[in-house]
Amino acid sequence: MLRAEFLSGGNSLEQAMEFTCKLVSSIFIGEQENIPLGSNIHIRCESSIDAQIIDERMWESPKEMIIIHNISNQDNKACPIQISYPGLKVDDQLFNILVNLNPDLPKDLINYKNLFQIVIEDGGDLRKRAAESWKNCLKLNIETKFKP
């Protein structure tokens, strides 16, 4: 059964991207409760530009380790962490975790076991769209919680 955690990623997209890099590394090395070590992670961005930025940052952060990842259109299905954005095809059967930096939910949401929805507390459109995603999770009877 899918579980969704809505996590405050900061007040800007910049802060949320940094938060996402730290979150993905902690998931990957097994620091997150109830998530198996070595889980395959799909990072979903809102745009190709955001995906490129996350890709670059993931090579730099965290500084103490290298986490192998790629952008989904680079056609490397063996990679345990893939970054995408709407319009790219992703084989969601390969991933059990979705880290969603996009404030909107994907159509294939129920194929994942865990959703980490990054909420950008901008006081505007991004926050409102994340609130709609929360409501949609509740409508789908997904176990949902918020962590500030």
Image (cartoon, helix red, strand yellow):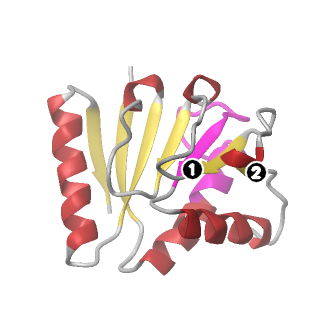
Q: Secondary structure at mark 1?
A: strand
Kind of residue sitting beneath label 2:
His
Lateral position of residue 130 relative to residue 52, left or right: left
Q: Is residue 41 left or right of residue 117?
A: right
Q: Residue furthest front?
A: 87
Give x and y (percent) for residue 88.
Answer: 56, 45
Label 2 secondary element: loop
- What amino acid does circle 1 point to? Ile
Badge 1: how crowded within 10 Å, few (<14), some, or many (20+)? many
Return the residue at label 2.
69
Residue drawn at x 54%, y 36% is: 97
Q: Taking 90 as reference, is 69 left or right?
A: right
Residue 21's place in the image compared with 75, above or below, is below
Q: State the extent of the magenta-drawn residues as a range.
A: 23-44
Magenta span has 32?
yes
Q: Are marks 1 and 2 in contact (CB under 8 Å)?
A: yes
